[in-house]
Image (cartoon, rainbow, N blue to C red):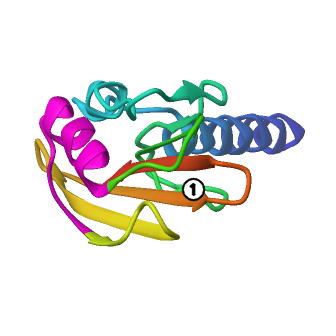
Amino acid sequence: MRRWIALGVVLGVAVLVAGAILLLAPWPSGTLREVGDRFTPVGGSSDGPGTYEPRRLLCLGDNACPSVHRSWTVPSPLTNEQLQRSIDAAGYDATIRGDCSTGNCVARGTAQGWNVTIVALSNPGDRTAGVSLSVQR
């Protein structure tokens, strides 16, 4: 009888571990990372590698999965034309709303089936701008 209980416990733990691995293991995300890597704002220097959340059966945390999030600091406020050039160079089909040079603007569109959002926040007081990119389904 003890033998069957021990076997049941071992099998139960094995099923739980296998299930957790299956739910949380990263799956291929196709062209997601490549789409995110194509964008760089004019004159922008990256504020770090950003975040990459791979596809999973169970998404945890605040980031959608799969998704890419990156940010840059630009030494002067961007114009709508500069941002549009960066968008076009990346091959995104996105439309800008707002005035990038005086406050903030948002570009939303698609690239290879992924939803792309670019936000540019200008700070005319210190003549800089922050640009962030989000790519997800």
User: Going by the image, does 10 lie left or right of 28?
Assistant: right
19 or 49: which is nearer to us?
Answer: 49
Residue 8 painted magenta: no
Residue sticking out furthest to the bottom: 98
**Residue found 63% across the figure and 59% down from its top:** 124
38 or 99: which is nearer to us?
Answer: 99
Residue 15 % position (x, y): 60, 41
Query: Does residue 52 appear in the picture of this structure?
Result: yes
Image quadrant occupied by the N terminus: top right
13 or 87: which is nearer to us?
Answer: 87
Q: Residues within 10 Å of mark 1 (few under 14, many from 20)?
A: some
Query: Does residue 137 appear in the picture of this structure?
Result: no
**Residue found 39% across the figure and 35% down from its top:** 41
Q: Is residue 90 above or below residue 122?
A: above
Count of numbered circles on the image: 1
Q: Is residue 8 above or below residue 29?
A: below
Q: Which residues are magenta?
A: 80-96
User: Going by the image, does 93 lie left or right of 27?
Assistant: left
Image quadrant occupied by the C terminus: bottom left
Residue 86 painted magenta: yes
Tell me the SS state at disc 1: loop
Quarter where residue 82 is shown: top left
Residue 102 % position (x, y): 49, 68
User: Going by the image, does 105 lie left or right of 131?
Assistant: left
**Residue found 66% across the figure and 26% down from its top:** 48
| Dominant secondary-structure state across the stretch colored magenta | helix
Residue 80 % position (x, y): 29, 56
**Residue found 57% across the figure and 24% down from its top:** 45
Residue sticking out furthest to the right: 2
Residue type at the position of mark 1: Asn
For disc 1, the marked residue is: 63
Quarter where residue 38 is shown: top left
